[in-house]
Amino acid sequence: MKQIIGRLMAGGMLAALALSMTLHAQEFKLGSRTVQVHGFASQGYAYSNENNFLTMNTSHGSPAFTEGALNVSMAVTDKFRVGGQGYTRKIGSLDDFRPSLDWAYGDYKFASWFGVRGGKVKTVLGLYNDTQDMTFLYTWALLPQGVYPVDLRTTYIAHTGGDAYGRVSLKKAGKLEYTLYAGVRSFDNREGYYYYSAGGGFPISTIKGRMIGADLKWFPVKGLTLGASGADLTAHRTGFLGKTPYTFDSNPNRPLAGYANYARGKWEGSFEYRYVNNYEDISFGGATPIHEDKCTRNWFAAASYRITPKLQAGFYHSSTNVEAPTIPTNTASNHIYDEVVAARYDVNSHWDVKAEGHFMDGYGDGRQTQGFYKQWNPQGLKPTTNLLMLRATFKF
Amino acid sequence: MKKLLYAFLLVASASIFVVQAKAQVIVIANNSVKTSEVSKNDLKDVFTGASTSLGGANVVPILLKAGTAHEEFLQAYIGKNDTAYRAGWRSLVFSGQATMPKSLDGDAAVVEFVAHNAGTIGYIGKASAHEGVKILTVK
């Protein structure tokens, strides 16, 4: 039933997009207030020479890469706004067109230096966490997966809780922007957590957690953004290994990020380093927990250049290093390095198309979500993967 | 791969050295906007969604859809081309942090709208007629 609803929603969104293209209808009146409607739909195709990636059958070429969103928002007063966004996607076996509520919240801005948001709020973590699904904003068809994994989108992108935020002028030293947040995490049973856990023999029965965190951005000079983020996450996982009950508890799970972005003229460069201080206490049948190291060091460096007003090209290097791989002698499992070249063409203000090549070395550790899953690679994983990604997006 | 990287950096670095011409656009506001001047930073904040106030009062930016005045305004005060500029607004809209500002066809439409809507602020070509609105000095 959910699949039917999801597919109807996807079809409805596409119809709404087509209709909006015809009627240019992006807003309507609700009493005296204007309600704005925006959305996007994206279709991709992926082909890999070796391993299947992100639960898609990429080794045979896969068009199973579709996503879309529809949002409505309204300024109730000069200080108070409300809005929400519905989202659906099918990326291989991720989500399978099930509709979800991406975000829905009220936002009250007391002053430029202090505002609050409450509801399901996108999480500010690093450069792109709260906009990771909006790839129409970027040159890339896929953001660096070591830092912004597509298969963990639901887990990181939003929290149900509240934010305090604001922007403060430092006069000649630029501006500071801060966000503080706390809330409950979401876990999707058709995403990375469930799939990698099942692949390791630990199917999940229940999982819940919360997050608290902060982000600070500094804009010292025109075009430059410097920032740092930190979060404290929990995840309490339960299930059965055979007939033996197990629990996994994060102790701790703290992603820490430092990042920079500089845009000038026709080019833009960005960098992010994210250390995920991640340990888990694993207990079987109530026995004394085993303390397991799942820490990773991740970073990417990217640059893009606007060749013409419609054409952009870019590249990035993404790196993930697993501190304590399950099998230390398996050198392909202790890292994933990804070198990417991409081109983006803006057909018009609504359409863009992208072509991207990924040259990946390593496949990461089986105890974590790294994009490569045993269930979709029953023949075993090869040490390198070359992936071609094509993507077309419509937005309004 | 390394040669491609070096070639990319060489071409990209040449674009850093850009000579900017003096803007041929003026910033206009509804007569309800009390301030008569605005700093470049404050203007950029309003037109990028970073701020919704000017001189202590709420303002609403009004854009041109396209054209010379639009491109010059972006070049002089925002530092982005149209695609990057609208992408910035989309990131706010799709995160629920702002509503997309209204974009109008031509200077006359912008003047008409700003003149009749309190709190609005826009930009037009320097030579365009602008009865009914006030001009903000950008310092």
Image: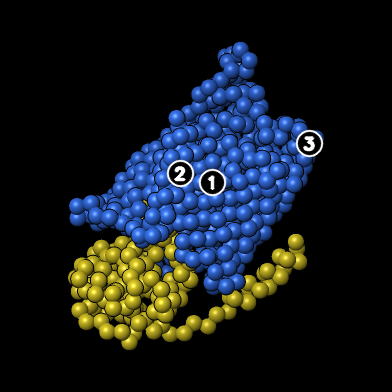
Q: Secondary structure at mark 1?
A: strand
Direction from residue A216 to residue A315 in the image, left or right: right
Dots 1, 2 in contact, CB < 8 A: yes
Crowding near pointer 1: few (<14 within 10 Å), some, many (20+)?
many
Q: Is residue A209 above or below residue B32?
A: above
Residue tagged by mark 3?
Answer: A330
Amino acid type indicated by mark 2 = Ala
Amino acid type indicated by mark 3 = Asn
Q: Is residue A186 visible?
A: no
Residue tagged by mark 1?
Answer: A66
Crowding near pointer 3: few (<14 within 10 Å), some, many (20+)?
few
Tag count? 3
CA gap, disc 3 and disc 1: 34 Å
Q: Secondary structure at mark 2?
A: helix
Crowding near pointer 2: few (<14 within 10 Å), some, many (20+)?
many
CA gap, disc 2 and disc 3: 42 Å
Colour that chain A carries in the picture:
blue
x 23%, y 51%: residue: A30
Q: Is residue A191 above or below residue B87?
A: above
Q: Give the numbered dot on residue A10.
A: 2
First in residue order: circle 3 vs circle 1: 1
Mark 2 or mark 3, whichever is nearer to me: 2
Dots 3, 1 in contact, CB < 8 A: no
CA gap, disc 1 and disc 2: 9 Å
Labels 3 and 1 positioned on one and the same chain? yes
Amino acid type indicated by mark 1 = Thr
Q: Secondary structure at mark 3?
A: loop
x 57%, y 59%: residue: A353
Chain letter behind tag 2:
A
Q: Is residue A339 above or below residue A203?
A: below
Direction from residue A22 to residue A67 in the image, left or right: right
